[in-house]
């Protein structure tokens, strides 16, 4: 197999030089793959994505070890803007649309790292409206006034404006109705298939993510606890504990608590 | 009635001058959350540089352009060497840095241009003109027009250019701005350069009014109540706040002054600002959370 598009090797990370968030995370995303990053709250999904896109320093975080290679280049010396320009775009956790900017202005802001002319910019915006026709109707509306689903589409559209080769998404279905959540994943898979876009997606909704991903990594306490093809991971019994955010021992405590209450 | 209108118009026009100073604060506060105490020193520095250049027999237009270039460079240098190294520091640290900076700039101005008071003549007569029954100083009118033009130009810049869009994006959400590949340091450098330009305009108008002297840097103190009223992050707020403070000051001088033995202009703006702070801390136009009803 050829070099993966993204490879993360033994990356460790802290916040405020004190709080250990990642100990030794290694993962790869091959060209044309959809890879899911699963794990309970606080497992380190967001931190892993931030470490890859060099956003940690913006949130008082540091990489303490290991390295990241994107498209054959080591990324530690690259700023977030350079990484975006190199083809690595991210939809950060919680969408973070620019609230006072209109939907269309949000999209345009997504092309900030590229040097493209106005004509090309307009064509790219039209392409996004092609993906999400309902955004076209809201183009003049401040993003903050859009529905949660529309904001997520705006955030994804904004990231796609950077013409990425690898798109990273942090919990794209958070707070969305099941139907909308499925639509988003459906869209991502179509994009992956039609435009050969590689995708790394962190998700709480493991059932949904595993249905669309080729492979998955399960994080636990800042390191990879399990990795494999989606079908395998789905079958693993112990994975269910990760989905629930319980460990077997804690679950026992929980059940004994229930039985105590019962008596 | 016509006397009241006279007072009001006079107040509004002098308020324009306050708006100008407040505007410089807003540009920087909006993009980086820094309350730039050095804005007053920049006003002084700009005015002093300009006068000194004209006194060295440089033509008006050349002096203006050179000062403009110096102010843009100063803004860029401040961003590069003071604020960039302090990125991710608390806002009180940044405020203290600008406080220190204001003394550095004043000191530099003193070293470069000396300490004496300079007269500044922009060639705009300060004669009253009659509009119906209301008399307006020509100088005030021109100052108001210049301020209005500048605000219109800034608004156009923010609404129609991609740099303006980057500016608003950074003001809205810094983390998202970094994530989409905007370079904060570029946007900040532009904000400081623009603040330098605003300082130049304010410095010329204030300097022509009061003479160019070191007390010019204390106009920052007048900008604070304006910002409290208008909101620290709103350009419209800086304008309306300035006009309001101007009108309130003039009216107080005429209608309250006689009962308290005069001297109201020294404190009335601060008292109003304090009262306002208790009722509406975000200011009239301060960024409200935009939420769906
Ligand atoms: N800005 C921060 N400052 C300090 N600690 C942080 C910060 N962000 C995350 N952490 C800590 O780092 C660890 C990993 O958090 P992270 O946000 O990466 O988890 P996550 O898997 O994304 O969780 P979630 O599913 O809740 O989003 C947690 O212990 C968390 O408390
Ligand atoms: Mg997270």
Image (spheres, rainbow, N blue to C red):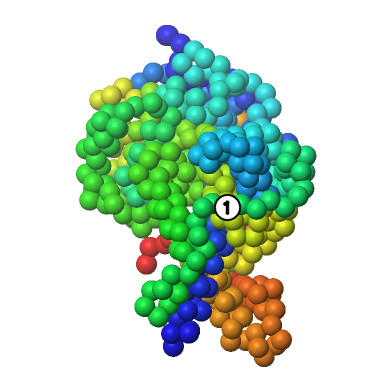
Considering the image in quadrants, where does the C terminus of chain A appear? bottom right
Q: Residue A230: percent from the left, percent from the top?
A: 41, 29
Question: Which of B246 and B130 lies nearest the eye of the viewer?
Answer: B130
Write down the quadrant of residue A183 in the picture.
top left
Residue at x 69% of width, y 73% of height: B266
Q: Is residue B74 left or right of residue B186?
A: right
Seen as rendered, the residue at the extreme bottom is B259
Q: Is residue B146 above or below residue B250?
A: above
Residue under the image location 64 percent in, 34 percent down: B77
User: Looking at the picture, how far across and down is residue A73, in whole percent?
Assistant: 52, 14
Mark 1: few, some, or many residues within 10 Å (few <14, many ≥20)?
Answer: some
Label tally: 1
The image shows residue A24, relative to residue A263, as above or below, that is above
Q: Is residue B57 visible?
A: yes
Q: Nearer the viewer, residue B11 or A32?
A: B11
Circle 1 is placed at which residue position?
B121
Horizontal arrangement in the rendering, residue B124 relative to residue B257 (left or right): left
Asked whether mark 1 lies closer than 8 Å to ligand 1, one says no
Identify the element where label 1 is drawn.
loop
Q: Quadrant of the N terminus of chain A?
A: top left
Quadrant of res A156: top left
| Front-lying residue, B54 or B20 | B54
Q: Chain of mark 1?
A: B
Residue B145, how many percent across, how many down?
43, 58
Q: Is residue B266 left or right of residue B240?
A: right
Residue placed at 55% from the left, 71% from the top? B246
> What residue do we see at 22% from left, 51% from top?
A137
Q: Is residue B188 visible?
A: no
Tell me where residue A212 appears, x and y as whole percent: 34, 33
């Amino acid at each position: 197999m050829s070099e993966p598009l993204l490879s993360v090797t033994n990356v460790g990370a802290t916040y405020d030089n004190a709080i250990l968030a990642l100990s030794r995370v290694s993962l790869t995303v091959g060209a044309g793959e959809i890879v899911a990053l699963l794990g309970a709250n606080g497992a380190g999904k967001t931190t892993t994505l931030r470490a890859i896109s060099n956003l940690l320093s913006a949130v008082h975080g540091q990489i303490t070890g290991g390295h990241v290679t994107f498209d054959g280049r080591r990324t530690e010396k690259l700023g977030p803007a350079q990484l975006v320009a190199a083809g690595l775009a991210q939809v950060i956790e919680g969408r973070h649309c620019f609230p006072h900017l209109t939907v269309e202005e949000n999209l345009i802001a997504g092309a900030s790292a590229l040097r493209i002319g106005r004509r090309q910019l307009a064509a790219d915006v039209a392409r996004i409206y092609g993906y999400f026709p309902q955004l076209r109707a809201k183009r003049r509306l401040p993003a903050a006034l859009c529905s949660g689903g529309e904001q997520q589409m705006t955030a994804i559209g904004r990231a796609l404006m950077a013409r990425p080769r690898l798109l990273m998404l942090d919990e794209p279905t958070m707070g969305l109705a099941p139907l909308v959540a499925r639509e988003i994943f459906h869209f991502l898979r179509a994009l992956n298939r039609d435009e050969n876009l590689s995708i790394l997606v962190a998700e709480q909704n493991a059932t949904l993510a595993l249905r669309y991903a080729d492979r998955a990594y399960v994080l636990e306490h800042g390191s990879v606890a399990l990795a494999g093809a989606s079908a395998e991971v789905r079958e693993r019994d112990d994975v269910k504990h990760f989905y629930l955010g319980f460990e077997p021992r804690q679950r026992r405590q929980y059940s004994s608590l229930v039985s105590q209450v019962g008596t | 009635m016509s006397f009241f209108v006279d007072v009001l118009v006079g107040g509004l026009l002098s308020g324009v001058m306050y708006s100008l100073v407040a505007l410089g604060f807003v540009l920087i506060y909006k993009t980086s959350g820094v309350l730039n105490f050095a804005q007053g020193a920049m006003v002084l520095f700009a005015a002093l540089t300009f006068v000194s250049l004209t006194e060295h027999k440089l033509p008006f237009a050349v002096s203006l352009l050179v000062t403009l270039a110096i102010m843009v460079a100063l803004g860029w240098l401040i961003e590069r060497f003071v604020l960039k190294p302090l990125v991710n520091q608390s806002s009180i640290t940044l405020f203290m840095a600008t406080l220190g900076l204001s003394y550095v700039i004043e000191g530099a101005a003193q070293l470069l241009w000396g300490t004496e008071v300079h007269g500044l003549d922009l060639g705009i007569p300060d004669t009253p003109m009659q509009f119906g029954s209301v008399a307006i100083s020509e100088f005030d009118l021109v100052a108001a027009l210049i301020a209005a033009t500048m605000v219109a130009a800034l608004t156009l810049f923010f609404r129609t250019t991609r740099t303006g869009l980057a500016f608003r994006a950074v003001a809205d959400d810094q983390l998202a701005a970094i994530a989409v590949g905007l370079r904060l340091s570029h946007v900040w450098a532009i904000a400081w350069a623009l603040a330098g330009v605003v300082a130049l305009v304010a410095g010329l108008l204030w300097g022509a009014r009061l003479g160019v002297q070191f007390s010019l840097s204390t106009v920052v103190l007048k900008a604070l109540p304006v910002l409290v009223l208008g909101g620290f992050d709103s350009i419209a707020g800086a304008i309306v706040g300035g006009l309001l403070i101007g009108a309130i000051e003039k009216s107080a001088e005429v209608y309250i002054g006689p009962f308290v033995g005069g001297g109201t202009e020294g404190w009335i703006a601060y008292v109003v600002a304090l009262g306002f702070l208790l009722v509406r801390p975000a200011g009239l136009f301060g960024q409200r959370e935009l939420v769906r009803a």
